[in-house]
Image (tube, rainbow, N blue to C red):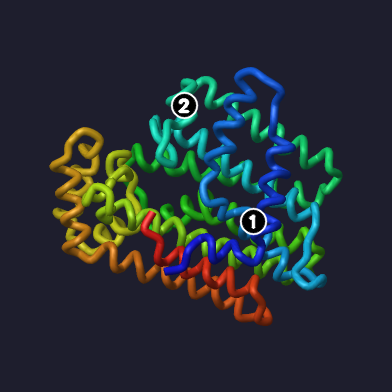
Amino acid sequence: MVTINAIRKPIETELEEFDAFVRRNFSADEGLVAEMLEYVLSSRGKGIRPIVVMLSAAMNSDRDGRFGKRSYLAAMLVEMIHVASLIHDDVIDESDMRRGRASVNARWQSSNAVVIGDYILARNMDIGLSSGQYDIVSHVIKSIATLCEGELIQNDHATKLDTSRDTYFDIIHKKTASLLGVSASVGALSVGAAHDCIAAMRKFGEAVGMAFQIRDDILDYTCSAATGKPSNNDLRERKITLPLIEVLERVDEGRRREIIDALGRCSHDEASIEFITRAVGEYDGIALAQQTMKSYLQMALAVLYEYPDSPYREALMNLCAYVAERER
């Protein structure tokens, strides 16, 4: 199985420099802001987006894979947008945990979590504009509005219990795939790649992002090694994701109504969750969603095949394998 460390390996030194770059730019002297920033920066997760930015920059560089501060800036802008969006997501979802420890809202209350998320976004853009790298800032900044649109569409349809296949793809494109598309394309932009290369890398990143989110939604129905049970968080939040959409498109109207009615009770009724989980298994919802995920990864690989062989292309191909195989 491919590991994140294997994907990071060609740019390991640069990623260490990047972490230092982020900490230099996101620090405060003292007080609550300093405490919250340190907490947030110490749990940034796997860092897939900056990895994608830098691998794309290296693969598109005409200097034997080398890249400079423009690429570090691009990676930071993307990563800190993602960090802020997760803080806001936890407030919206009332989540108490993030990556195995208390979420920002659980530790400092939702009001402070919203403010620190806003602070990170504002400071991020200020750093970008102050750098004078306006092409990079312009390329990245639109993704904030796209993320917000995706969240609003998802919340609206969760209330109505009527998410269609097209709506689902629109939501995951806006909430996940768009920022990964920007990550890959801004990496190419940061090293002066041609327009068609930038466009190709956006296509690559968006395809990986679609696959990544579909895999996430599959895992919500899959038993974890820790508990032996699926988490079913999406069902508790009344979200209709691809495994369930595959079922709803295949059952008759009576069974569909039963499933939708059960979904409306999932926030407080474990029996309804079990009913839907059984239906997803009975109608091969997970296997069908896996097929769609794999088709997006094939799209991503098709972009990479247009590039000459290099450690950076291999790492991005390994990323595709990682997305398909990951367990959490």
Q: Nearer the viewer, residue 203 or 229?
A: 229
Residue 268: x and y, percent? 21, 33
Q: Name the residue tied to disc 2.
A: 105
The N terminus lies in which quarter of the figure?
A: bottom left
Furthest residue in direction top, as rendered? 31
SS label for mark 1? helix
Q: Nearer the viewer, residue 191 or 310?
A: 310
Residue at horizontal 64 percent and vertical 18 percent from the top: 31
Q: Name the residue tied to disc 1.
A: 183
Residue at horizontal 60 percent and vertical 64 percent from the top: 9
Residue 112: x and y, percent? 54, 21
Q: Is residue 35 visible?
A: yes
Furthest residue in direction right, as rendered? 132
Q: Amino acid at mark 2?
A: Asn
Residue 59 against residue 157 in the figure, above or below:
below
Residue at horizontal 67 percent and vertical 51 percent from the top: 16
- Picture quadrant where residue 130 is located: top right
Q: Nearer the viewer, residue 246 or 35?
A: 35
Residue at horizontal 80 percent and vertical 52 percent from the top: 69
- Sort mark 2 into few (<14), some (14-19) or many (20+) by Cα contacts within 10 Å: many
Residue 103: x and y, percent? 45, 32
The mark lying in front, picked from 2 and 1, is 2
SS label for mark 2? helix
Residue 263 against residue 199 in the figure, above or below:
above
